[in-house]
Amino acid sequence: MKLVNSNNEEIYKRYLRIAGMLSRMSSESNCPYINSRVAENIFCLATGAENLGREDCSVDAKKDQIGVGVKTFLEGNDYSSQKIAEFNKDSGRFRGLTEDRIVEEVCKLRNERLRVTKDIHNLNEMIYHCVVRGEGYIKICEFDMDFISVETLRDIKLKSNSRVIAFSDGLHEYSFNLSKNTLYMNFDTSNPELMFNVSILDNPFDALLSLRDGNDSIRPEKRESIILPLFSDRGGRNVPVKSGLNQWNAAGRLRNPNEIYIPVPSWVKQKYPDFFPGRDEPFRLVLPDGRELSAKICQDNGKALMSNPNSALGEWLLREVMHLEEGQLLTYDKLLEINIDSVEIIRMRAGLYKIEFRPVDSYDDFVEANGIN
């Protein structure tokens, strides 16, 4: 296994056993029940991996430049088809296409998301780490999270009496559900890396009652963050051609081709007036791959988040993440393609912030949560 080893295997099994023991809290099955988020948290706790579960990218965890998609599912006769991607926002791309062309389009979209995840988090490889649950036991299986080879696609066929297209690229077998716009991959779990027994408690609540509760000294940590759009809604949703992420294209003085800024909407400044330092006051901004930039709030009314030098943010976002050529405009269609249209800025402590990408609609949800019309 890539990250579970002799140093952490026993504690990892112990955590999973404990979670499985409590299955009767939500399931009557004799197979241990472990929620997907719980599986992610246990994996990260045991291995020391960074938890990326909140970022809605192609992996759930990262350690040592390895990206890990943590999956948990029930054993299915050593063979299981599991969801690996959804394309609801891209459903219009598939209308009117033949089955072969739909598969090609889905594969290209999937590969672009994998590529963006690798670049954002500076990953050398990506894997699936599967917690497979059977009656009285748990298996651990791992598989490469490969790019789909469009050049070797084969066996493309519509399953009888269904809206599902099955296909293979020679490495893995996949299926695409046309009704759900969801991509599945087949996992062969017949050769696990690890397997151990789990005993399920008949009444887990009795066990929980034995724990201390009501400790007023324990307080949940408050996550201070805001979400900023990478787009504008003026004149319809778009990325402005001469401002924001395309500031390098603005008229007037000669500009660096990497010059950009992330817009800070006026309502965010009004509702969160003390979130950022004052205008032109520098602070540290940690990128998803761990690198740091010097950043500050600039322009009239503090409407822009920029880096210092102002080309550093664009060199990372436009070149390394978006893979745009110098002089190529960023468009909203590009953001939709990679399922990113906003960023979350997290205040770690005074003078230190972290930036994370957020999927399409995250900013709209943030607006609604704050009661903004």
Image (cartoon, rainbow, N blue to C red):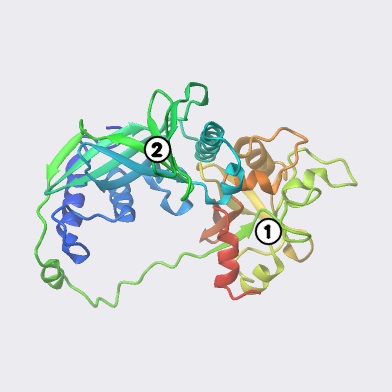
Q: Secondary structure at mark 1?
A: loop
Q: Amino acid at mark 1?
A: Glu
Mark identifier at residue 106: none
Q: Which mark is residue 159?
A: 2
Residue 266, percent from left and from top:
71, 68
Q: Give the label on residue 281, or none.
A: 1
Quick one: which residue is furthest to the right in this view? Answer: 252
At horizontal 71% and vertical 45% (from top left) the residue drawn is 331
Amino acid type, residue under disc 2 in the picture:
Lys
Quarter of the image with the C terminus in it: bottom right
Sequence order check, earlier mark of 2 and 1:
2
Assign the N terminus to one quadrant of the image: top left
Seen in the picture, residue 350 relative to 291 is either above or below; the reply is below
Which type of secondary structure does the marked residue at label 2 adopt? loop
Depth-wise, is mark 2 or mark 1 nearer the camera? 2
> Between marks 2 and 1, how big is the CA–CA gap?
60 Å
